[in-house]
Amino acid sequence: MAFCAHAADADIRFRVNEYVVVGDAQIPTETLHRALDRYTGAQIDFATIRQAAAALQALYADAGHGAAQVSIPEQDISGGAVRLAVFEPKLGRVSIVGNQHFDEANIRASLPALKEGMPPDLQAIATSARLGNDNYAKQTQVSFRQGENERLLDATVRVADSAPVRQVVTLDNTGTGPTGTTRIGYAFQHANLFNTDHVLTGQYVTSPTHLRDVTILGASYRVPFYRIGGALDFSASYANVNSGVVPTTAGSYGISGSGEVYGLRYTQLLPRIGAWDQRASFGYDYRYYRNNVTPQGGQDSLVPNFVAQPLTLGYSGFMAESQREWRASASLSQNIAGGGLDSSAAYQAPGGRADASASFRVLRYSGFMRRPVIKDWLVQAQLDGQYSADALIPGEQFGIGGVDSVRGFNEREVINDRGYRASVEAQTPDFGKSLSANGMQARALAFYDMGRAQRNHALPGERQHVAISSAGLGLRLTLANRGQLRIDYAQVLQGGGVRDQGQGKLHANLTLIF
């Protein structure tokens, strides 16, 4: 029986034993059979064959071959086999425009699936572009158009880039009384080491009034793997804060603490779900917490040192369009218990935590939403939390309070094993143009913050939970990616036993980028 792709007689039926895919077949035969076998049988009509062609088209698109075209050629199907023809255009010319700081070799290396003379794998190209756009200094967008003939597609890569080297200076008041409230920081970043998009970051933070008492160092290194859509991150940090002699109701104590954290984390981009960009991660951290709390005139610390070695599996996703943004993340950490400072015995040593387990498990989560409402007014909400059923050492506990938590309180002024914090903000329309013609953005805001921390395995006399909250006003000034000023004034609504109701606190942060 002769079959024409344009046949329209729905009453004609025939036996179809198999579909034979001819042309540019880029998909394994077994996969083709699984997708097309459902359209075989003794009583198949023309509509079913068209459904098979549509299913094959979708299969190619899902595999990244969105440019492939499936057709049903005129044929004789009396033998029970139906031929489906696949034509996939090849890549003709590739044009790179807009790049000023990253050369053509770099752009091409970050899009390895974009090769002249080969069929474009649209999924692989999109994944590489997503990974490359994580780089703060380079954003790329790839578009296609028909080439010299119908068998060719030309690609244009539009690049928006900036200098890969930048320096950042920060000034804020996140410190506390014994070491001064002011903190000053310096960071150096290079976003294209060896012309391979490797990113190096180094950071130093101290107190300008107590230079010898506050030292915070950090470094990270990121390696993207464009062919597989993943990245490997190395990180290291060191902190040493000496609070000096602190008088308490139980006497005066010399208090200092330091710590080292080393981390290794691999992140894999996952297929998008519509506009939802998602990724999974797996990491290992080594955290050494050093504590030195000594009575005045004494030498031995009343608080022991600890080591934690958690393995962490995480998921994160986001969606951003115009002024709308949604983000969510979750991670599960399982600590690896050892026989030294990373053992339950070390955690439970005198001055440590009764019932603390070195095999602790922690679930952390976060969510964020921002959207416009009336006439450029913005509303945003954020939730962060931690859940654990274990008695945790202080460094692994959840902290609430501070500029990015519950404003009106010091950083991590309240800590405990599990808890959450939530924040809601309403921001005014941007009035930056009335202040400056240099691209300044300015918004005023009102906010409400609240948080709760709860203790597991509480001992007699220990508080099982603490709740705090605050409300206030703020200001955000941003100057064309060159800096930001953030000011918030919060008034305590619920002090949780650490602050008085009505007590106020100003949070200020200045960031300058060079």
Image: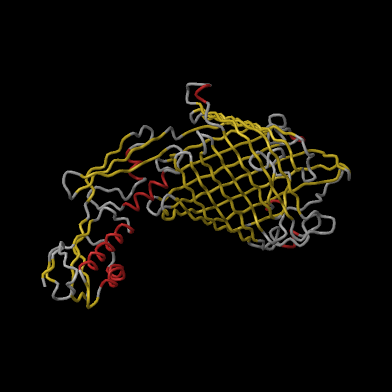
Q: In the displayed image of the protein, which residue is found farthest to the bottom?
A: 42
In the shown orientation, is residue 336 left or right of residue 393? left
Residue 163 spot, x, y in % from top left: 43, 32
335 and 447: which one is in front? 447
Q: Is residue 434 left or right of residue 341?
A: left
Residue 438 lies, with reference to residue 406, above or below; the image says above
Q: Position of residue 82 (x, y in %)?
A: 18, 70
Q: Residue at x 73, y 53 (%)?
A: 305
Q: Quadrant of residue 353?
A: bottom right
Q: Across the whole image, how many numbered discs are drawn on residues?
A: 0
* Relative horizontal placement of residue 475, taking residue 160 as reference (left or right): right
- Give the percent coordinates (x, y) of residue 126: 36, 49
Q: How is colour applied across the structure in the image?
A: secondary structure
Res 446 → quadrant: top right
Residue 34 vertical position relative to residue 512 in the rendered view, above or below: below
481 or 103, which lies in front? 481
Residue drawn 66% across the image and 34% down it: 206
Quarter of the picture holding the N terminus: bottom left
Residue 308, horizontal then vertical, whole percent: 66, 56
Toward the viewer: 447 or 35?
447
Which residue is nearer to you in this view: 268 or 103? 268
In which quadrant of the rendered view does residue 73 lie? bottom left
Farthest residue, direction right: 250
